[in-house]
Image (cartoon, coloured by chain):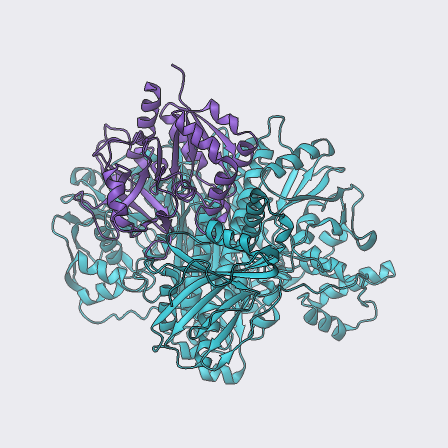
Amino acid sequence: MGNVRVLVLRAAGINCEEEIVHGWCLAGAEATLLHVTKLAEKPALLNDYQILTIPGGFSYGDDIAAGTILAQRLTLELEDSIRQFVDRGGGVLGVCNGFQVLVKAGLLPGGKWDRDRVTITHNDSAKFEARWVRLRVCTARCAFLRNGEILEMPVEHGEGKVMTAGEGTAAALDSQGRIALRYVDANGWHGQYPANPNGSVDGIAGLCDATGRVFGLMPHPDRHLDHTQHPLWTRRRLKPKEPPDGLKVFIQAVEYWRRG
Amino acid sequence: MSIENGSSVSEDQARLRYWSIEVFPAGEAVDGHGNEMLADIRRTGVTGVFQVCSSRVYMLEGGLRERDVRGLGGDLLADPVSERWRVFRGLAEREIEGPSVEVHPLPGVMSPVAQSTLSAVRRWLRFRGSPESHIGAVKVARRYRIQGAAGAEELERIAGKVLANVCIEQGYVQGLGRNDSLPTTLPVPPQRPFCVRHVSLSTLDEDGLRRLSREGHLFLSLEEMEAIRNHYRALKRDPTDLELETFAQTWSEHCVHKTLKSAMVYRGDDFGRSGRVEVRFENLLKDTIVAATQELNRAWCLSVFVDNAGVIAFDDEFGVAFKVETHNHPSAIEPYGGAATGVGGCIRDVMGCGLGAKPIASTDVFCLAPPEFDSRRIPHDVLHPRRVLKGVVGGVRDYGNRMGIPTVNGAIYFDERYLANPLVFCGCVGLIPRKFVSKQVHAGDRIVVAGGRTGRDGLHGATFSSAELTSSHADEFAHAVQIGNAIEEKKLLDALLRARDDEGGCLFSSVTDCGAGGLSSAIGEMAEKIGAMVELEKVPLKYSGLRYDEIWISEAQERMVFAVAPGRLQRFLELFEAEEVETAVLGTFTGDGVLEIRFQGQVVGKMDVEFLHGGRPRRELQATWNAKTWHAEQKIRTRDNNGAARDGDLAARLLEAMADLNVASKEWAIRQYDHEVQSRSVIKPIVGPGAGPGDAAVLRPRLDSYRGIAVGCGLCPSKADDDPYWMAIEAVDEALRNVTCVGGDPDHTAILDNFCWPKVDTAESLGALVRACRGAADAAVAYGLPFISGKDSLNNEFVMDEAEAARTGLPQQLAIPPTLLISAISVLSDVRRCVSMDLKEAGNVIVLASAPVREAGLLTANAMHRRVAELIASGKVRSAHDVSDGGLAVAVAEMCIAGEIGASILVDPVMYTWDLFENAPTTYVLEMDSVAAKEVGWPIIGRAEEDRRFRVWHPTAGKADVAVDDLAAAWRRPLGAPAGT
């Protein structure tokens, strides 16, 4: 069994590619950077990889709205290739801006949930905010997560509020296991601001599609790859035994695709 | 009325030249921007307005079919869940539903959103099979429906003060009896015929030269004007306007720091000793700051004072570059854009350091008037400090976050004297392979400009920033406002690093950024030793109609100039194109020592680089200083400074001190900055469970190593009221304290100086400058901290007429306090040994480590810093915090707030002679376990407590017993909630 191979997409304004690549490497995968223009010129390059990753940043300035222009490029130039890639067993991870792109391109929540039902919009605070949050994994479906686990990592965004249209949309997503992560408070329950940093409906922090292989989240697993990144690490007397929470996401995925 | 998406025009396939699409928040969505504007409007004292609904208007020119316009609305411009949209024919047609203000960019102002939208529309048309020629241009406006305004005049005021940024935007008011007509076409820039213009200089007398310097915005002294005149007399011709501009840029205070580099004779009080001295400096900067670095002669200083940034060694493979810039004058006029482009410019300095450093962290420091300053006392043409604060924080946030560079350290310092001259310091740290630290332009290299296009924005920045502000500057210099586009710079960075690291070796032989002075400074500096030939018509323009001299000195942002060997040019250009970065080859570095500039085949400037860079007449200045006179003068200038009450019980004083603006929590600002992007942060600016104020930031420049850097700063302008010499020493001391607190290594710490000074036109004001330079140098030598880079910004004064001064109660010449920012960068061997300032555990004791430099002297103070650093490195310190604004009492209170536990302290005034609330230099508070503390032998002043209460005993000041939560509330209130800012 060879290494898990990951393609990390670059584009104008994407700015978290270095830490995403680092996360994949720490987890034992082999990660390659590629500009979206090059992929659009030769979509068959996807065949060489098992996971496509869209990192965070401000792709094309988030002009018009967050992720909109890169989502347009994916939809117009690469949609069929990406859908075939997922159908063949490939995975897609979108972090922060990458998550916004996946939702706006209609790849999340995926399937019959087209882009008229779910979106990501401005935080209720109308401001960019950086803070650490707690997350609960709410699905057994997602290839990147372990159900029930509590994870800590930072959010850093101005447009991270998941918003749904239509009665019962969020409940339906939940019953289908597509709500992958929720913001929770110190006790593990649904919390108000700042536990839920952006006013996301039903505390949604991350979504996956029906296969569980397409996954996006607003918080940054790529910024909790080492114990010294946790904001309270200087208060710990001993180094924790488990890997840092963010790294767990990458490890879980590598194990999943290694199993095939 | 209910809005159905795209329903307002009849179905037809007609093509129209102009369309507008308005996009609104859907009913269920929160209109965050509208709510924010409502809050801002109410804060200006307008109480009647109760609702603001915001929308965006996309104006499309070219000849789109209606079918395509509708497709664009649904597919691209509006979000199907959170937004609704409506189509209008033409540009000016709108649905009238009550009063509104529409905000348009002024003609010629670059809008990144419009540019992105244009290319997205083109792409959409291409994939739909519609002709791309159907779209020619896009303009984007913001529209606000406003409920509750008293009248059209009030709307107009709201438009000017809150909604529109009048430097770059125009507001159109509709309703309540007003009906401004919206533009019906997109603006076309004026076209001007090309002819070479000469300035008659040879015949001018002294008065004529003075007038020309002032009216032409050259800001050159009479001696300098005479030198240029005599030079051209000898050449037997007049200079072209472009040549004269080039001298003005190259010889500007901003570019050559002519005051600090002048010869100076100082007569006055001795430095740190009693008595009077006379000292002659050949070059003030070289004989103080630079001399300190030379004396220290540290092998790990890789590049000092020669490049865009200073570089020190990080490990065997990498160095770290650090640069701090000011962007004061532009930020006074347009805080958001000024701060944003300040950040962008400093990042480019680091990108253009050596053969390119990768920016890994930013810092920002603001000096502002208090945000609650009485708005009736604001001079004409001065922005309210609340608006300045909000603008500069927003500018740093948007530029830094978009570039993906974490903003990790900074300060906000308040003093009324910054009212008309707010200070904005932007810093950037970069990681650079040591093999790329030096660069060299070769004759024959091609000149390539890369990045953003050139427009009329930012003309005269270098000369403007070197002048004092007057109340007419806002109008006169609106064109000095620069517009930033962070994504353009991010693309440039991506391309630059790829070209640097290309398999076959770096693709360019030199690089520098286009900052103040634009191409004239960038190419002029690179050609300093060898000369160049430049063809200005090759510069890519944002719009046609620019004159050749405007192209030459434009300060349009996000541009860098590269020197590329002909053999590597092709690959260089291809690589940049792949990163979506525009490039143009402008000419060649020639080797003939002549800077020749052409436009459309004609020579518009031909200058000898030796005279351009070496012909500036040097001055010898007189400087005097006398403590008594200085103190008398400072009393006139300062008002309400350090006004914290000394009476009252200790608990009340403590709560008041926590709420002092210079102490109060800056969390509101810090949380808006992405301080973790790039995943390097170890000690963050917000510390502990209670979100306390970190002393310095710690980062891991290499993700594959635990070796780290600490970044901190020192700033204490109020101490200059007493003596600028000690102010400078204490600023250095504070910067060192901050990096030491987190685990920095004083033996591997470098510092940077940023002088921001009032006018330096008198011997007394120069005397203050000399004292600060000497103080900084003395501290640097004693503490072993080499300066590696620096910058100065002089003439930070605002001049009012008598009537305005009387009306506002401000002095006619409103000068900032002499301000010196010291930034420190320290290399540490293992970040896992770092310490944060939050109190960790009840039962630990609190140790005072104090040897205030002013009493103890530099040698004793240095020993104290080093002992604290050793103790922290030994792992025996659980938390460390430095005593600065607010004094010892506040320092311990902050540690309690951050750790969410309590403390009791007993301070003996015999042992610690400073007031509990006084900023005491060379003083640290350390938390240790009691056994370790006894071994050290320093005074134990208290212990951490289980309950969340802070208890203080002081024989003369009294005692206090306050809940930590109450201290935290008082500390968070002033700048805490979005309210007020």
Give the residue furthest to the right. B236
Asked whether, in this view, residue A10 is left or right of residue B526, the answer is left
Look at the image and give the colour of chain B: cyan
Residue B326 x/y as whole percent = 52, 56
Give the residue furthest to the top. A1
Which quadrant would the C terminus of chain B be assigned to in this image?
bottom left
Is B924 in front, or is B981?
B981
Residue B144 x/y as whole percent = 43, 68
- Residue B628 visible in the current orientation: no
Is B838 in front, or is B815?
B838
Residue B215 x/y as whole percent = 69, 72
Quarter holding residue B25: bottom left
**Looking at the image, is B175 positioned above or below residue A236?**
below
Asked whether, in this view, residue B971 is left or right of residue B219, the answer is left
Is B541 in front, or is B703?
B541
- Residue B338 visible in the current orientation: yes
Quarter holding residue B504: top right
**Looking at the image, is A214 positioned above or below residue B520?**
above
Which quadrant would the N terminus of chain B be assigned to in this image?
bottom left
Count of labels in the image: 0
Look at the image and give the colour of chain A: purple
Residue B182 x/y as whole percent = 56, 71
